[in-house]
Image (cartoon, grey):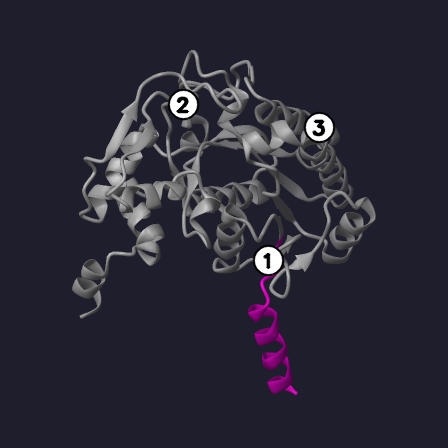
Amino acid sequence: MPEMLVAKEQEDVDIPSRRVLVTGATGLLGRAVFKEFNENNWNAVGCGYRRAQPRFEQINLLDSIAVHDIIHDFQPHVIVHCAAERRPDVVESQPDAASQLNVAASGNLAKEAAGVGAFLIYISTDYVFDGTSPPYKESDVPNPLNLYGKTKLEGEKAVLENNEGAAVLRIPILYGEVERLEESAVTVMFDKVQFSNKSANMDHWQQRFPTNVKDVAAVCRQLAEKRMLDPSVKGTFHWSGNEQMTKYEMACAIADAFNLPSSHLRPITDCPVVGALRPRNAQLDCSRLEMLGIGQRTPFRAGIKESLWPFLVDKRWRQTVFH
């Protein structure tokens, strides 16, 4: 009889009691968030849409019945809402679809989270600001310049209106371990960096703060764990890398990290004219999270090397590593 008790207790230890649901778990940020919780004693369930099976639940977030069902079946303590249309030019060209996902689905998720008492973290963006007077605190008045920023800001409002205990986490440009280079606006530059036989124009106007998805994931987990102990942890928060760089400077840093030439890269200092308007410098002030003892920052050079080496085409470099 005592042996039976020991075995039962052992089973309880093996399955973590804290449950988290991650939307957009197939995306660049969602994969990192899922992994961070999963590796830190949380029972994590991820949902995705096009890329879901077999690892994640396939849920269309616009299907309110499917959303209700998974939340009621799983009863998560925390929901991290990473799913979004994040490409500013796609939002401009498909405004209705983008608004459905970024606003309507977010409001509905917030309502369902409130229904089961789950803590919702809604991932938002530095693009809610116009970039004219950085750095920006959580209390500063948003003024999005493009439809992407507008839909994410409307999503924030929908979340907080439907769930007063929710959190909004605004973050800037992301990079990390991509499945394809196009998955991140940082890593997508790698081909232009590598093909040094062709000169490449690089934006040197917009000031960015490239942020590693692993760091954002750690912040989400730390925020969730703090909230489980303290119900006053709610409202709006900012997280960001602290290295200010234009895309030209990022490209040069990438070239340097892999000992590649950068003389073919051309800095363009004019304000971009094509596509959606972008804020000049929407630097986020992260002191609210820092005061809570929350945060993690991977230096850009180290993070970008880890993310990009699988996409390096130069065989000589590979030989120095593998032989």
* Residue, far front: 198
Label 1 sits on residue:
44
Q: Residues within 10 Å of mark 1 (few under 14, many from 20)?
A: many
Q: Which residues are magenta?
A: 1-20
Q: Residue 256: name its quadrant.
A: top left
Label 2 sits on residue:
283
Residue 243, visible in the rendered structure = no
Q: CA distance from mark 1 to mark 2?
A: 31 Å
Quadrant where the C terminus lies?
bottom left
Mark 3 vs 2, N-terminal side = 3
Q: Residue 62: name its quadrant.
A: top right
Label 3 sits on residue:
158
> Toward the viewer: 142 or 289?
142
> Toward the viewer: 168 or 281?
281
Residue at 56% over, 57% down: 42
- Residue 192 placement (x, y as % from top left): 32, 41
Q: Amino acid at mark 3?
A: Ala
For numbered disc 3, what is the local secondary structure?
A: helix
Q: Is residue 314 above or below residue 140?
A: below
> Toward the viewer: 231 or 27?
27
Q: Amino acid at mark 1?
A: Ala
Q: CA distance from mark 3 to mark 2?
A: 24 Å
Q: Is residue 170 above or below residue 178?
A: above
Numbered circles on residues, count: 3
- Residue 261 placement (x, y as % from top left): 18, 42
Q: Amino acid at mark 2?
A: Gln
Quadrant where the N terminus lies?
bottom right
- Residue 176 placement (x, y as % from top left): 41, 47
Residue at 66% over, 29% down: 155
CB under 8 Å between discs 3 and 2: no
Q: Residues within 10 Å of mark 2 (few under 14, many from 20)?
A: many
